Image (cartoon, rainbow, N blue to C red):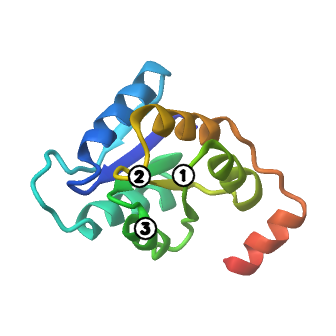
Amino acid sequence: MKTIAIASDHAGYELKQVIAGHLRTKGYTVNDFGTASTEPVDYPDLIRPAATSVAAGQNDGGIVLGGSGNGEAIVANKVRGIRCAVCWNADSARLAKEHNDANMISLGARLIDRELAKTIVDAWLNAKFQGGRHQRRIAKIE
């Protein structure tokens, strides 16, 4: 992955900024779909375009953030071709990629701190899809 879409609601804005900066220091291109402040927004308006960009191949993967990350994952997963996993630790992120070939992850900004969020993102980015029996299962999902 070289290009990452990122989007958040108001609750995830500050952590989104941290993650975007973290990605840039690692050499990733970050395409930010918003929001641009902590002012309340309707997260589907921001998450869907980010997910659509990943599904269309305009971004290699995506990270979405909200208070819990649940609503954002639900929105992203409504876009055909997206497999977005809510991640809460490094193992959940690694397994999301290894077993589910997650092309997006969702983080709950009210549930994890900045350092853990960076660890989660790194685990997801560094993991590789294992294929095999997992590919068969993904085909059934699609």
Comparing 87 with 8, the one in front is 87
Quadrant of res 133: bottom right
**Which image quadrant: the N terminus?**
top right
Mark 2 sits on what residue? 111
Mark 3 sits on what residue? 70
Identity, as a three-letter code, of the amino acid under mark 2: Leu
Q: Nearer the viewer, mark 1 or mark 3?
A: 1
Name the residue rendered at 84%, 56% in the picture: 131
Instruction: Name the spot of residue 39 as percent of width and height, x first.
Output: 9, 54
Name the residue rendered at 47%, 39% in the picture: 117
Asked whether the residues under the numbered discs 1 and 2 touch, taking CB atoms below 8 Å apart as contact, a structural biologist would say: yes
User: Helix or strand or loop: what does disc 1 sit on?
Assistant: loop
Mark 1 sits on what residue? 88
Cα distance in 3D space between marks 1 and 3:
11 Å
Q: Is residue 69 above or below residue 114?
A: below
Would residue 85 appear left or right of 79 to someone viewing this image? Answer: right
Identity, as a three-letter code, of the amino acid under mark 1: Trp
Comparing 120 with 5, the one in front is 120
Identity, as a three-letter code, of the amino acid under mark 3: Asn
Name the residue rendered at 20%, 51% in the picture: 35
Cα distance in 3D space between marks 1 and 2:
8 Å
Comparing 120 with 29, the one in front is 120
**Of callouts 1 and 2, which one flags the residue occurring earlier in the amino acid sequence?**
1
Instruction: Name the spot of residue 13 as percent of width and height, x first.
Output: 24, 46
**Of callouts 1 and 3, which one flags the residue occurring earlier in the amino acid sequence?**
3
Mark 2 surroundings: few (<14), some (14-19) or many (≥20) residues within 10 A: few
Name the residue rendered at 12%, 60% in the picture: 40
**Of callouts 3 and 2, which one flags the residue occurring earlier in the amino acid sequence?**
3
Would residue 67 appear left or right of 22 to someone viewing this image? Answer: left
Instruction: Name the spot of residue 104 as percent of width and height, x first.
Output: 52, 55
Cα distance in 3D space between marks 3 and 2:
11 Å
